[in-house]
Image (cartoon, rainbow, N blue to C red):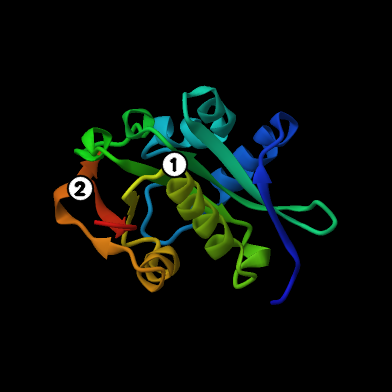
Amino acid sequence: MNIALNIRDADPNEFDALGRLLVEVYANLDGFPSPADQPHYYEMLADIGRFSEKPSTRVLVATSAEDHLIGGVVYFGDMSQYGSGGTAVSVKDASGIRLLGVDPEFRNSGAGKALTTACIQLAKDRGHSRVILHTTQAMPVAWGLYEKLGFARSEDLDFLQNGLPVFGFRLQLRQ
């Protein structure tokens, strides 16, 4: 699918729609916990706009030329705001990426890659030497995308989220 994408900060009036999109995407992943299994996680997804209130944190969206919401991601310029389990919040000189999601109708549009590369550029702009993210085995498309972009598995960042194995990745931007 070849469409023109616009990557930008989410407008506050898009937060509810993005939250609904992320809940739908994550709830429909084979092997990922359901909203009934992890209600707090899904509440966080639904209220994605709250991340924009955190210091050095941005909610980015991908939109079509017609301004149709295609997907979103949260960028953390300060890992202390990252909010995951495990040791990621203590990583220095790093940016983080969480909660990437793309409307299933727009898979293979390049939106996931564009959102991720926008976050990588924000990390470079901040002068950070690495980017941290997490994914699960229920997200093989994202996992493959991250590896193609140069992210490497970092077992020291792994953790369990209510029994779900969550796998850490790092992208070294510089030594």
Of residues 21 and 150, the one nearer the viewer is 150
Whether residue 23 is visible to the viewer of this picture, yes or no, is: yes
Judge whether 98 appears above or below 5 on screen. above
| Element assignment for label 2 | helix
Q: Nearer the viewer, residue 147 or 136?
A: 147
Q: Quadrant of residue 139?
A: bottom left
Toward which corner of the image does residue 95 lie, by quadrant? top left
Please state, as top left, top right, bottom left or bottom right, where the C terminus lies in the image: bottom left
In the rendered image, the vertical position of residue 112 relative to residue 10, given as above or below: below
Q: Is residue 11 above or below residue 64?
A: above
Looking at the rendered structure, the kind of residue marked 1 is Arg
**x 55%, y 61%: residue:** 112
Q: Find the distance from the CA under tag 2 to the CA under tag 1.
A: 22 Å
The local crowd at label 2, few if under 14, some if 14 to 19, many if 20 or more residues have their Cα within 10 Å, is many
The residue wearing badge 2 is 157
Q: Secondary structure at mark 1?
A: helix
Q: Report the disc number at residue 126.
A: 1
